[in-house]
Image (spheres, rainbow, N blue to C red):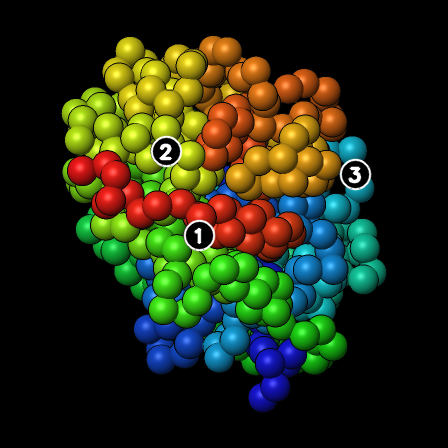
Amino acid sequence: MSGGSIPRLVIAAPSSGAGKTTVATGLMAAFAEAGLVVSPHKVGPDYIDPGYHSLATGRPGRNLDAYLCGPDRIAPLFLHGAAGADLALVEGVMGLFDGASGMGELSSTAQVAKLLRAPVVLVVDASSQSRSVAALVHGFASWDPEVRLAGVILNKVGSDRHEQLLREAMDSSGVPVLGALRRDGRAGTPSRHLGLVPVAERRAEAVESVGELAARVRAGCDLQALLALAHTVPELPDAAWDPAAELAPADGTAATEKPLIAVAGGAAFTFSYAEHAELLAAAGAEVAPFDPLRDEHLPPGTQGLVIGGGFPEMYAPDLSANAPLRAEVAALAASGAPVSAECAGLLYLSRSLDGKPMCGVLPAESRMTERLTLGYREAVALRDNALAAAGTRVRGHEFHRTVLEPGAGADPAWGLTHPERRLEGFVSGGVHASYLHVHWAAEPSLAGRLVASAAQTAPAGSTVR
């Protein structure tokens, strides 16, 4: 089997709430438990579902977002992430045909399925219908002839009689039923203001939940038929994305003297794309994870810092209580070392979060609100900084219920150009801090620039302690 012919399925739904995360994660776990190497993928910018996918498969959960990365990168990123797998499963986003607002099919599950030449299995919430399910499926199957809707999994089925009625209705649709799952809340995953609770915050319970999902899927789905369907795909003509080909080691660095980039993780900072660490390493860095909730010091020799997204608002007292680390982060930033902070990282660098002292790197205060800020953004770097050269254009995603006051510094991180025009974030010395989540695979120069700047920075251990 060549890399381009990796067996693959896209798990989609008519709308959010139908159960595609439950089904996709259960399928991943069930196939992995059967001995297959399963590559997990998620359409869209979501960070949380890939954590459950990774738990189910033992491989990094990877995102496929045609808005953030461009349609031309979808198949190469898929092939990179799925290398060596026996099966790749792609969980969709929202409804099958829902994409970036006002941009047609861009970033929709349907577009990704077409780019991957993958059959779609539709997860249908059957809880309030019987014969109508056939009309629903017929509409989705006929809407776009380039989308191959090849099977249906009936979810939230109430009884044996209900399942019989649904299957009889589907007999005339021409789309096979590949599974039927009963209503069952026992294997659910808890949610809060931005979606599911991340795996890192409930690992023991998440392991149990994923195991229950696998058991439900095994009992209710025809795994052999699904696997056979996955093998009906054509070969993709694209070459796999290669971070080493995107970036050479930073100028002035040698293999024995790699600049050390510390990357925040743990329960408070769970939002990160797997390709970011790969790009940092490809640019010549040594990547060292650390947990701001547990570690009182930055990794020895830190020359640069990446603090991604997550839920610092849930851990503000604990983050604040770790005063030694906050002091080291502030000192590293003051030294001019490159610091890239997104969303949660932005809040961590502020003076305070919900009244709790943070690192004090930025002249701003942050707090939780009831208002959700959500959507894709287009932005441009207004001046040279440690992450982006002036004029660099990116597409990003905002997703938070916090506010920062002020929202931009004297030197903003980005000038947003669409769907609204405003200044956003902070650039100060080597610090680049913003609410905007950017996928570096779309603009690998961001990683290269960060590593090149770190290579010129004295290690933290020589100045901070």
Disc 3 from disc 2: Cα separation: 43 Å
Q: Is residue 133 above or below residue 89?
A: above
Q: Nearer the viewer, mark 3 or mark 2?
A: 2
Sequence-earlier tag: 1 or 2: 2
Residue 455: mark: 1
Please state which of residues 134 and 433 is positioned toward the viewer in this rendering: 433
Report the front residue among 228 and 333: 333
Q: Secondary structure at mark 3?
A: loop
Q: Quadrant of residue 422?
A: top right
Query: Dot 1: what SS?
Result: helix
Q: Position of residue 365 (x, y in %)?
A: 39, 13
Look at label 3 and name its amino acid.
Met
Q: Nearer the viewer, residue 446 or 174?
A: 446
From this view, report whether residue 320 is shown above or below residue 145: above
The residue that label 2 is drawn on is 335
Is disc 1 surrounded by few (<14), some (14 to 19) or many (20+) residues within 10 Å?
many
Horizontal placement of 234 versus 385: left or right? right
Residue 270 appears in the rendering: no
Is 395 left or right of 155, judged from the image as shown?
A: right
The answer to whether any part of residue 356 appears in the image is yes
